Amino acid sequence: MLTQAIKNYFQYFAHPEEIERCDEDVVVCKIFNPTPAIQANSYYFGHPEWGLNYFEACHRDEKFIELWREVIGSWQGKIVVDIGCGPGNVYASLKEFCGEPELLLGVDVSLGALKTASKLGYTAILADAHNLPFKSGFADIVVVNACLHHCDDMSQVLKEAAKLVKPGGLLITDHDPQKSAYQFKGLGSLLWQLRLPIYRYMKRGGHSTAEEQSWGLATEVHHKACDGVTSKMFYEMLEPMGFAVKVYPHNHQVGAAALRGDYGKPFWKYRVAQRLSGINPHSPEAALSLMCVATRIN
């Protein structure tokens, strides 16, 4: 049964008939093609222990906040959509710095993660990012953080996210692996594979057991050797849709300096694998992530 509060948000849905139910303050929409990746993301990020580990460990550090705070400025009184919101890390990290949105929609495929996000202040929507149920052009800011590489078709998800942005609005993506940084081969590729049993032995977050590691890897569809996002993908997809696009290669310890061309250095283990693979670890192509900041101009 849908609450009156949820019905008030119908104005933003292009296909309200796709809403199935409201489950503990989460609006559940139909998912027409529950692929293995969608099922893995649903289970992994909704797991009570693994999801909590992710919430506490990822995208909460000082440099993350510094970079995102400078890009967003203020979202006070704005309509914000967080696609692939998980348990709500982006808002949890920035709510003290960026004000209160007029509306904060969080979209994910994991019911467990969305229940956590709803407690933080998200209007939580369970939906497939490849086929969003919303109208076009209503959002001031659309966030896609650490999401694309968990999706089967990264370009399709990027396109769906871009459609939501109104003229003058922002689309921000980040923390997806840059493909050129992971072109591992030979000994570099072997070292990359060896990290998994080492992580499991160390009980590193996300790898504390064989089961957790297996499910976590199943969610990371494009976080593999010779895979990931490219600057070309962002420009070719978004510019024809009316966006002015800026792409910032960066490693995760440089913060807002990434916006001024300081991409930093990969962590040592990546530098070793890159050198063994013939990649210059001090080049922008070796930066582990790409941040895309796109402004809709028409």
Image (tube, rainbow, N blue to C red):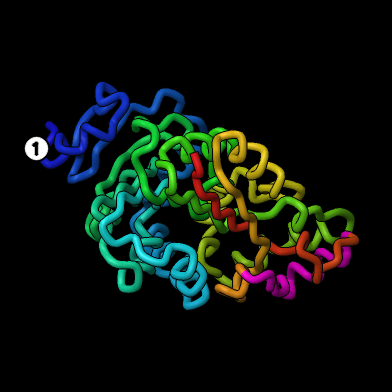
Tell how many labels. 1
Magenta region includes residue 276: yes
**Is 297 placed left or right of 142 in the picture?**
right
The magenta region covers: 260-277
**Looking at the image, residue 66 lies above or below residue 143:** below
Residue under the point 28% across and 46% down: 124
Mark 1 = which residue? 4
The answer, for residue 84, to whether it is visible in the render is no
Q: Secondary structure at mark 1?
A: helix
* Residue 269 sits in quarter: bottom right
> In the image, residue 295 lies at what x, y percent?
51, 49
The answer, for residue 92, to whether it is visible in the render is yes
Residue under the point 41% across and 67% down: 73
* Residue situated in front as seen by the camera: 176 or 290: 290
> In the image, residue 35 lies at what x, y percent?
50, 30
Q: Quadrant of the N terminus?
A: top left
- Farthest residue in the front direction? 298
> In the image, residue 239 lies at what x, y percent?
61, 40
**Is 76 placed left or right of 174 in the picture?**
left
Residue under the point 34% across and 60% down: 75
* Residue situated in front as seen by the camera: 60 or 260: 260
- Farthest residue in the bottom direction? 62
> In the image, residue 271 lies at what x, y percent?
78, 70
Other residues around mark 1 within 10 Å, as few (<14) / some (14–19) / many (≥20): few
- Farthest residue in the left direction? 4
Q: Residue type at mark 1?
A: Gln
Magenta region includes residue 70: no
**Looking at the image, residue 113 lies above or below residue 26:** below
**Is 123 placed left or right of 45 in the picture?**
left
* Residue situated in front as seen by the camera: 197 or 9: 9
* Residue 203 sits in quarter: bottom right
Residue under the point 24% across and 54% down: 102
